[in-house]
Image (cartoon, coloured by chain):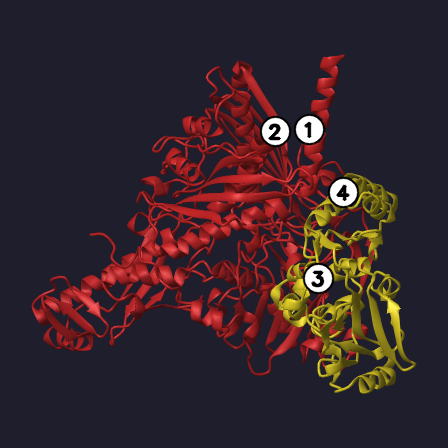
Amino acid sequence: MSMSPFELHRPDDLPSAVRLLEKYGDDAVLHMGGTELLLLMKLGFAQPGHLVDGKRITDLKRLEVGDERLTIGAGVTHRRIERHRDIARVLPALVSLERAVANIRVRNAGTLGGNLCFAEPHSDPATLLAALDATVDLVGPGGARTVPFREFLFGAFATALAPAEIMTQINVPLPRVGARVGYHRLALKERPTVAAAVVLGDRHCEVWIGALTAKPLPVPEAAAALATSGGRDVTAAAEATRAAVLAVDPSEGGDYRAQLASVMVTRAVADAQPRRAL
Amino acid sequence: MGPNEAGQRRQRKDIIDKVTGRARYASDLEVPGMTYARLVRSKVAHGAIKNIDTSAARALPGVICVVTAKDFEHLDMYYGESILDQPFLSVDRVRYIGEPFAGVVAETQEIADRAAELVRLEVEELPILENAAAAMHATTLIHPERPADLELANVCSRSVFEYGEVDRAMTEAVHIHEATYTFPAVFHYAMEPYAYLAEWSSAGLDMWAGTQQPHKVRADLARIFGVPHNQVRVRVPYVGGGYGSKGQAKYEPVTAAMALIAQRPVRLVNSINESFHTVTRHAAVVTMRTGIDADGRIIARDSQVVYDTGAYADKGPRVARKGAYRSAGPYSIPNSRAVGIAVYSNRVPAGAFRGFATPQVVWAGESAVDEIARHLGMSPLEYRKRFLTEQGKPFLGDDAPMDADLPQGLQLAADAIGWDEPRLPGRGRGVGSGVKDGGGGAARVEAEVHLHRDGSVEVVASTIELGQGPQTAYAQIAADGLHAHFEDVRVRAVDTWGQRFDPGTNASRSTISVGSAVYDAACQVYAQVCDAAEQVMGTSQDLRLDGPDVVAGGQRKPFVEVLAEVRRLQPDWLGSVSAIGVQDTTKGDGPLGYSSSFYEVGHSAVEVEVDPETGVLTLVKCASVADVGFAINPEGCEGQDEGSTVMGLGHTLYEELEFNGPELINPSLVDYRVPRAENLPHDFHTILLENRDGPGPFGSKGAGEGGTLAIAPAVANALEDATGVRIRDLPLTPERVWRALRAHEEALHSDVAEDQS
């Protein structure tokens, strides 16, 4: 199939981009790396008449590593995150996750914001960002707002983005000193088959399973088992994960997927690393 | 005298064009007045056509024509290899999802694509036979016009091979091993989709095609359109991978048909999705009984192989015949019976695919032999070495004697992975051997070599450059025959106008057949140059061609002058600077008179590691031995063998065309998973065995398919070695391995429980 014709707009700032998206409505799409969008267009699944290219908007390319939080512009590429030395110190799990996203061509072009807004259920970063309780900043015709990432994702390919709204940045609260963050996934096909993200704090833990469900699945029972045992009772966490996945995935092969999820949790805990000083 | 140029590692002649993007494929071609086509494909798996509404498509501005079978009622629309059952556009029925039933020709590709979506097919749906198992016992017939089989429904072909007395031998066996093995349908994954350009003129049909069999295509086009061969020109530019998928006619007839109606040149470039809906490797179910005597020797084998050939025969009958025939190898089994059945179903047609029918039966045979060796308490390696067919001994009943040293090759593969070294826990090792009778027998082929006046050399040979390297190998062969430099030889692309007949670039046959003709032609030209040099220079001692010069007996003279002088000295000099070489294997004397001109051998040895928690099987070491007789371009041979091993790893661990009923659900490069570089171990070797015992130039044999033959059983055998679990279904996906491990563990526990009770 050949792509249907479209008009390309290349605004320099956010207000212009929002105006263009507003003007063309459903016929316009924001375009960043194009690693998902162009594929859909080639397959004929998307036929926008207007592409609003956000790559000239410098506001989307900010990247700041603070003491408390990490701020990543929605237009920052996977490759830039993967190679960022400061992120490697404060959140090594994100860097190792990014290193394994797709392949180097995709990582060179694809952006974190594009990945999250596409809301593919097999997204690697979505699972970790949900576990870390990140927030996302959005700007649209009605102004700016900040939404918890866990609420941003509605389901498969569905998000809280309103018409003509653009994700501008992702705010990742950094775990406290001493807390550990781990991510482990198994990719049997092009995209992850199952993934687990864990945050192991003094009093509070998080366990999230990715790729099996329409959006990342929290497993509070597993998190509680880890929290009450100081991160040591991995077996209980793994079994709680197995039960949680079986409960939401009763279809054929669900027992194998539950097994994989429990193994990924075990391995994510084993992989979990604390932040290091900048 | 041994070869000088052949045996050198040479950079491929086509590589610079290919890595710089300059190489031109059919989809790159443009001619004045060219139009663009798109085929319209059925979304129904099985139906009787009621109506095809093309009115909306025709009404779209820029559409030149929309064609259906109704436009070609005066033609014989059917093609195929041995059974002409496939029309180039559906005639009265559609038989699989993806079958083309109409074609749109337009001024631009975009218009053709849009118009194709406007064509409506109306059918009366027929019962869907989603695979061979369903079709064999159905009352609905996919091809009611085909003769009925006595036992089963929808049989496309049935082949039986029998020698010795199987039933008697089975009664004498002390142990009979019986098991059923399954093999999935897989995709060729040629990088270039199917692409063509056709133009009719007063000279006839000019067809550019990415094909492996231009002369077969020419014959099909001539028959379908009722024109003589001399009015059909098939030209083949670079082809981006074939692996069997571009054998016989594919979309050449429909492209020519569209060009006929459009009265304009038509280019048809299909998508990869459409490649998935063109041809596949046959899914197969192999049931094998093997009888063993008290010494452990295999005395009888009884096999049934059911190949799912999909909606049309394609090369299915030959696949079923060759698969049955090869199911008794690579051992000398005195009593063997094999039945190969190709069965129609409402799936994408299946046809030729690297290894041709053999990976399916070797998967069964080499798994079974491993199970037998373990049952006997013998080392699977030693067991095989003891019973593999000996070199020079009769093979497969009365076919050509085995021309390879099989035990030697297998031992080399085993040594390469450290077979005798201690195993780490969780790891296992396995081997497998496969043998396939090679192509190139029973044919007369010719090739030309021309020595130009400036000393440059042109080889004209009808072998397609599919990426396997004939342009390089033939240049080496010709350089040797002519005592010329490799750099001065060019091999022409294939064009049926003016080039000699060749059955096709397949079955690993080109080097030994066409390559031998190239060598013959080069030697003839060399003899003529020597003759001229003796007359002009008074010597032909150690004659060689050094660019534009002839060098002999310490003298040097430009070839153009030698040529002028010999003709002046002797006006009736009969010598020429061109020659036609011949390789004739039709005479029936010696090994080439058999159906097999050589045996293509693949030995695989692997070490695997199994993750018991996820079922993920990782290759730690992998060695493959290719018995190539003599490697003309060693780098090319290694590349071919590595490539075929990796391709075999696909169906071993990852690849499977997945169907929901009759519908293919993973026809894209994202969803269809092939092995990647990261899946290969660092310890990955190809070993070339060069005993100079083949029929090709310098003792060479064909190569490039061997690696696909035995890799799957080698891995499954290693899995059993590591875990005690035997899996008889491919691919060995993590889920399948995990389930087998769990079942195995549960069985062990219940055994323990029984012992305790």
Residue at figure coordinates x 45%, y 62% from the top left: B465
Label 2 marks a residue whose chain is: B
Q: Are marks 4 and 2 on the same chain?
A: no
| Camera-side mark, 1 or 4 | 4
Q: Which chain is yellow?
A: A
Q: Residue furthest right?
A: A142
- Residue, disc 1: B744
Q: Position of residue B566 (x, y in %)?
A: 13, 73
Q: Secondary structure at mark 4?
A: loop
Distance between the alpha carbons at the discs numbered 1 and 3? 41 Å
Quarter assignment of residue A18:
bottom right
Q: Earlier in the sequence, mark 2 or mark 1?
A: 2
- Residue, disc 2: B724
Q: Are marks 2 and 3 on the same chain?
A: no
Distance between the alpha carbons at the discs numbered 4 and 2? 33 Å
Front residue of B658 and B229: B658
